[in-house]
Amino acid sequence: MKSLSKYEKSIIENIIKLHNDNSALVILDNILDEHINEYYYFEVEQDYTTVMINSEYFNSNFSDGTNFTIESFIKKIRVDLYTAVNLLENLEKRGYIYLAEEREINSFGKITENETYASAEFNDANFSAKLYKYNRRIIIPSSSLLEIVLNGYMTNSEFALHKELLHNKRMFKWTVISVMVTAFSVLLSTFIPVLLKNDDKVISVRVIEDKRADSIKIPKLKLPQLSNNQK
């Protein structure tokens, strides 16, 4: 599960956060709350989905001459919804979430009273059926999903492998350091005696030279004796 996008991870984290907060229901409206702005909401039926866009927001952003078209806006929110629904479907199939009681909910998003809305439909019955399903159910995360999030979005086996790889990496690092220290020690043990040996040779030569100088004997000269007359 490490390949999840930032958007998908935020959905999973919101599910867990809502699950741990007893004051809020774990429903699609609350899960996607931070990703839906205040200018539109969705009406969901089994065979179609309608996006209701605030008229003032629509006229300000999608009038002629603007770079941001209604088509690009609808495409963006449709991609986000497809991603969310496909993620929930995948989590359910793998046993990471469970669906609890069904509630009578046919819309989600931020609805503002006394406002007029423009509408656009998603003509995808298969997608609308899935969205309708998850929009009406309370979602419960499994203990496995909680563990995955704690493990950095890795399963227990993936996390164990990750720890083993980190351990091997650390061991390899220390092995390299140990080899370098050993090699340096061998180098020193080879180089230092050579230096000392060379120093000994110099010293011994000097000693020998000194001994030779001491061993030179100066002969005593015999002076002739002078007779009394020569004195």
Image (cartoon, rainbow, N blue to C red):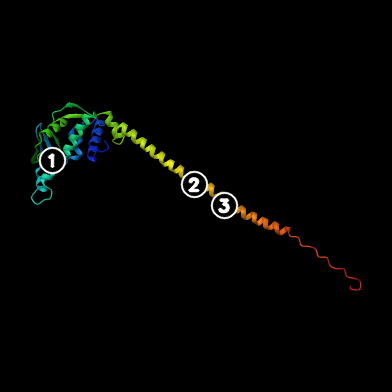
Q: Which residue is mark 3?
A: 195
Left or right, 175 with respect to 210, comes to: left
**Labelled pair 1, 2 in contact (Cβ < 8 Å):** no
Q: Nearer the viewer, mark 1 or mark 2?
A: 2
Q: Secondary structure at mark 1?
A: strand
Mark 1 or mark 2: whose residue is earlier in sequence: 1
| Quarter of the view holding residue 105 | top left
Q: Secondary structure at mark 3?
A: helix
Q: Amino acid at mark 1?
A: Tyr
Q: Position of residue 189 (x, y in %)?
A: 54, 46
**Residue 214, relative to residue 112: is it above or below?**
below
Q: Which residue is mark 1?
A: 40
Residue at mark 1 to residue at mark 3: CA–CA distance: 85 Å
Classed neighbour count for the residue bearing mark 3: other residues with Cα under 10 Å, few (<14), some (14–19), many (≥20): few
Residue at mark 2 to residue at mark 3: CA–CA distance: 16 Å
Q: Which residue is mark 2?
A: 184
